[in-house]
Each structure stands twice: as C-alpha cells, then as structure tokens.
Amino acid sequence: METASFQASFLLSPAHRSSVSTATPHGLAFCGLHKNLLSVKTTCAKVGSHSLTTQNPGKSSSWRVMASGSSNNGTPSSFDYDVIIIGAGVGGHGAALHAVEKGLKTAIIEGDVVGGTCVNRGCVPSKALLAVSGRMRELQDEHHLKALGIKVAEAGYERQAVADHANNLALRIRGNLTNSMKALGVDILTGVGTLLGPQTVKYGKVGFTDKTVTAKNIIIATGSVPFVPPGIEIDGKTVFTSDHALKLEWVPDWIAIVGSGYIGLEFSDVYTALGSEVTFIEALDTLMPGFDPEITKLAQRVLINTRKIDYHIGVLAKKITPAKDGKPVQIELVDTKTKEPKGTLEVDAALIATGRAPFTKGLGLENVNVVTQRGFISVDDRMRVIDANGELVPSLFCIGDANGKMMLAHAASAQGISVIEQISGSDNVLNHLSVPAACFTHPEISMVGLTEPQARQKAEEEGFEVSVAKTSFKANTKALAENEGEGLAKLIYRPDTGEVLGVHIFGLHAADLIHEASNAIAMGTSIQEIKFAVHAHPTLSEVLDELFKSAKVGEHSPVSVKAEPVAV
C-alpha cells in the first residue's frame, strides 16, 4: 500500500478481525506481509456448468473457461468488448494495458477517479509527504551533518506547500495513467459498474440513464476503503483515516495513531519529522506485528525509541470521540484480552490506521450467485471468481484488494496481468511469495517471502532444515560514505537446496534493494547461482551480494531450484 505503499494494500489489524463482521478472512496477512501463507491452501472450485478446455492444442498449459449452453443461461451471443475491467486503480490499469498489448478490445469502468486509492489517497501522495519528512530529518540531524562537514541554518517547512506537493503529485500521476490508457485505445467508461448477469455490466452516474455493455471477460478491481473499528467516530478533522491525513490540513502537537503496522509507521515518520509527538495504540502484544521479529527489534530501536513516540500495546481503542466544545480527543482504552478498562487518553488528534476493508458493495454479485466472505470475493489461484456453490463463474475474475489475497497495489497489478495472460490462452499463476513489500520510513524496511518463524514452521511440517545469514550496512562502503550504516539484511534459506525462502532488509534504500531477492524467488534462482552475480562497487546493492555470499549451502546441492507457483 497497492501496495508497497501506505494503502494500496493493507489488511485489517489482526486484533480487530474478531471485533467486526467485515474483518479479514482467516489466513490473510497483516500489513501486506505473508503472515499465514503456510496455512493457506489453494481454493478448489467445482466445475459445473462450465469446463476448462485448452485453447491451443499445441500448448498443454493453455486453457479457457467455456460456458456450456450459453444460449440458455443469459450469456450474450455477441460482445462489445473482449475485456471489461470494473475499477481503474493500479490493478485495473495494469490489466488494461496488458490487455491492449495482447490485442484485446478493452474498456475500464471507473465511478470515482482514475488511479484508485494508491494514486489518489495512498502510495503516491504518501511518498510525497515521506520525501519531505526524509529531508527534514536530514536537516535536523546536526550530528549527522557535522560528520559530513555540513552546516545549515535551522530547518523549517510550510505546511500548505507540503500538502500541495502531495496533491500535485497525485494529480500528475492520475493524468499520466489516464493518458496512457487513452493513447492505447482503452475506453474509459465513467460511472459505477454493476454486474447484471454473466458477461454483462451496467454503468452510470446518479441523475443519468444507465448504459449496458457486454464483454467476453469481466475483471473486478474495485479495491478497498479504510477500515474503522466499531466505537470510533470519524469527523475527518480531529479523528481521521489515512484518506484525510494525506491532505495534511494541520499538524497536531500530539497525535495518537491506532495501529503500528506500516501505515502507522509511515505516518509516525511524517508527523514526528514535522514536530508532532506520537502515541501508538497497538492491540497486539508487540509493535509492528507481521514483520520479521529480528527486523522489528532493530526498527523499533531506530524508528520509535529515538523519536518523540510512546506506545501502549495489548490495548484496544474501545471508543474514540472527536474534539469538540473545547475538549480534546477522548480515547477509551481496554485490555485486548480481558476487556478491562485501561484508562482514557486525551490527545489533539487520532489517526485510525487499522487497515482496509474490501469495496465490493453494489457490484451486483447476487446476479451471478456470488456471496462475499466478510466483504472479500472468493477466487481460486488464477483469480477466477467462485460462486456460492463453490463453482467457477464463467469469464469472471477478481484482482487486488477486493479478493484479499495480498492487499498491495503492485500485487493487484501482477494479478491483473496474470488474468490477461490466461484470457489470452497462456496459463499463468502468480507466486505471491515472490511479491515484495516495503515500508517507506527513514530508514526503510522491505521484505519478501517468509519470515523466520514462518520458515521454521514450514520446515518442521515438511521435514527440511532452515538456515539464516545476515549482513550489516556498517560493512558497506556506500552506506558508510552516506554516514548511514544503521541497517541489517537477513536471508532465510534451505541449506540443502539453496532455495531462498525469505529476505528482510532494514536500512538505506531497502525498498529498492529487495527486488534482487524478489526476482530470485520468482524465477526459482538458487543461492549458488546468485553468488556469481556481479554488483557495481561501491553500491548499496553489495549488501545483498555479501548476504548471498555468506550463505552456507551444501556442496552437492542442485544448482537451480525452480519453485512451483504458490497459490494463496
């Protein structure tokens, strides 16, 4: 968050899942991290009134969902489009561009603005604010600057100019996305899309007559909205979600952030750099749930303990009342487990960073016999929608936050591209374990694959050994030149085969460094092969070079490990 990012893709806080009916289904991850991948199995759908057939006899992996008796089940005999995508966020945009590349006549339906959450209320504007917080930290760190021989006057900022920078960036990227689709011939249909039946969609705006269009294939990509737990009153001014916070209408002296996942962490980075004091309220027994524990320990020391941040863990914000009549924001705390009162916190503002909920209401899913699971649309490992009877809905797919598999913007885009590949006749299954995630704090955090506890659980269940290798940024020339030696890279792997199970990085530009590891998992590249890769010197990429070289792999282990796609 999309993902990684502020919000493209973050899930509900685990402690809030049991408190509301719209919480995340069991087995999904917190903060876009692969927390429970080990227990998730591919959804099996029955093939009833439709069947899987090969489109190209020469390719055994090619397939297509074919409806039987189409003339009697409401399926159109001719179509306006090859593909209609409902939702023009990052996932829908990625699918649309790939569909055009494949020669498919494509339309995208958007009821709000092109770009979805990521571009307008998430990944993009948040990075603008974080760019400012990063510069402010550099200018405020007198010790760091002195070590580099730099003298500067006292740093300051203009709040409205910072807010304008974030808004202008969102507008620019939104325009880029819109223009790219128009230039390639994608029809952008404005209005709210609703399924009328198989391969048929209506769309329209309030006060205007609805229009109906048909397509051979329909992709749902409607994304998500901020999740607000019961008992919390949002006024958009003193109690607000990330949607409001990104407007930066004011900078509170003291702000409580409910949730310490990467949404909360990133906002704490912004607010403390701009002068606020922050209090985290975390329902679980530890801060930063979902991250690798070793990374959490180091990140907490650097990102939290050294800043004007305090925290309460193991407590729920049972009730939050906005500031009014001269009174501050009131936060009633209770013990997460016992529900015993833990006092009342009074602050200037409260940011609710407890995750996101799927936006799937009003889609007309009942017209294709689809029932959501806590708001999420059930799909198989190929993103094909599953109906209430456990059968595949012909020619209907769902990608991104709406299916809940991995709530990250880039995961949605990858799922969309995978769906288009299938529609075009090439079987494609996205390996979600290869999808990286990042938290854009200063320094950054990034990760891909399994955490160490997850890997050891998997090893115990499947009967293999797990090893861990680590390298420090303090040993990297480029990091030392930047006077940014605080950081750690961690590799989790199988010593018998050289398979990369997970990589976690905390340090300068960690979000950029993770992709070498991500690609290794995606391509099934073994550590033995990666060790021979050449990295420019001196660069931060050598952190990964040293990490892979330090791994101890058996002498007689195979050279290449082509991992099967992991369905989640």
Image (cartoon, grey):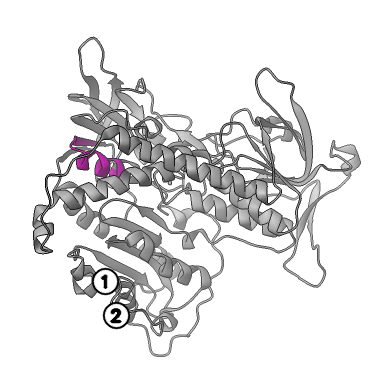
Which structural element holds mark 2?
Answer: loop
Q: Nearer the viewer, residue 181 or 31?
A: 181
In the displayed structure, would residue 90 be above or below residue 257? below
In the displayed structure, would residue 527 be above or below residue 373? below
Residue 399: x percent and y percent? Answer: 59, 47
How far apart are the alpha carbons under marks 2 and 1?
Answer: 8 Å
Mark 1 nearby-residue class (10 Å; few <14, some 14–19, many ≥20): some
**Residue 269 on the magenta span:** yes
Identity, as a three-letter code, of the amino acid under mark 1: Lys
Identity, as a three-letter code, of the amino acid under mark 2: Ser
Mark 2 nearby-residue class (10 Å; few <14, some 14–19, many ≥20): some
Find the magenta span and give its range: 265-280
| Left or right of residue 568: residue 238 | left
Q: Which residue is mark 1?
A: 470
Q: Is residue 337 visible?
A: no
Residue 148: x percent and y percent? Answer: 13, 64
Which structural element holds mark 1?
Answer: strand
Q: Are marks 2 and 1 in contact (CB under 8 Å)?
A: yes
Residue found 70% across the figure and 54% down from its top: 100
Place residue 234 in its image quadrant.
top left
